[in-house]
Image (cartoon, coloured by chain):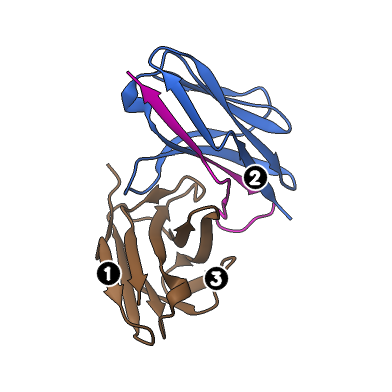
Chain colours: A blue, B brown
Amino acid sequence: EDQVTQSPEALRLQEGESSSLNCSYTVSGLRGLFWYRQDPGKGPEFLFTLYSAGEEKEKERLKATLTKKESFLHITAPKPEDSATYLCAAVAGGTSYGKLTFGQGTILTVHP
Amino acid sequence: DVKVTQSSRYLVKRTGEKVFLECVQDMDHENMFWYRQDPGLGLRLIYFSYDVKMKEKGDIPEGYSVSREKKERFSLILESASTNQTSMYLCASGGTSPETQYFGPGTRLLVL
């Protein structure tokens, strides 16, 4: 069974304090690893797709990386507006029509 | 910008009622998805559709049905609402890369 596990469940940072979120996955033949951001009361917003080990993607203060077993979302010098729930999702090889398996999410709070 | 809209942000229904949740996307995407999101369980796929009048079951289809009569519109139907269907319902659409999904704002459904 395909599985995606995120840690920690919640993370509190001071503004400017860099850190990383972890996403471990167990899927058959990973076809893609996705990161989404979700603000309270809203739907998830697409951030990144990673397809192969060693790949990195960046957007503002966020950088996503991928290994054969896990992905990291690095947050450099975060600001309060980065506070959100970050979701990781994986697609297995042979999966039909974009079936994503989501992790539980990491709730990030950045204090000013 | 991709826009996915959902018919209601909040709904309150009685047990046994038939409930319709509607989703509309404006990007001419072939693929559309319905998820529910519950604390501690993350996002779980209910149904998806890869073309007009085509549908496939997701991980938790029991108690739900769907309809896709037009490409831009995907409806989720609760035939006889039950209290365990109280949840946040999220619709998403995806194009040629269906794993890259764009979500609507969600409908928070309370079944009394």
How crowded pointer 1 is (Cα within 10 Å; few <14, some 14-19, many 20+) is rated as some
> Residue B18 at x, y = what percent?
35, 84
Residue indicated by mark 2: A4
The subunit letter for the residue under badge 1 reads B
Which range is magenta? A87-112
Residue indicated by mark 3: B56
Q: Can residue B71 be seen here?
A: no
Of the pair A60 and B71, the residue shown nearer to us: A60
Residue indicated by mark 1: B11
- The secondary structure type at the circle numbered 1 is strand
Disc 1 to disc 3, C-alpha distance: 26 Å
Disc 1 to disc 2, C-alpha distance: 31 Å
Quarter assignment of residue B6 = bottom left
Identify the amino acid type marked 3. Glu
Please report the residue visible at 73 percent of the width from the left and 33 percent of the height from the top: A69
Of the pair A60 and A78, the residue shown nearer to us: A78
Q: Quadrant of the C terminus of chain A?
A: top left
The subunit letter for the residue under badge 3 reads B
Q: Quadrant of the N terminus of chain A?
A: bottom right
Disc 1 or 3, which lies upstream in sequence? 1
Please report the residue visible at 61 percent of the width from the left and 44 percent of the height from the top: A90
> Residue A29 at x, y = what percent?
74, 44
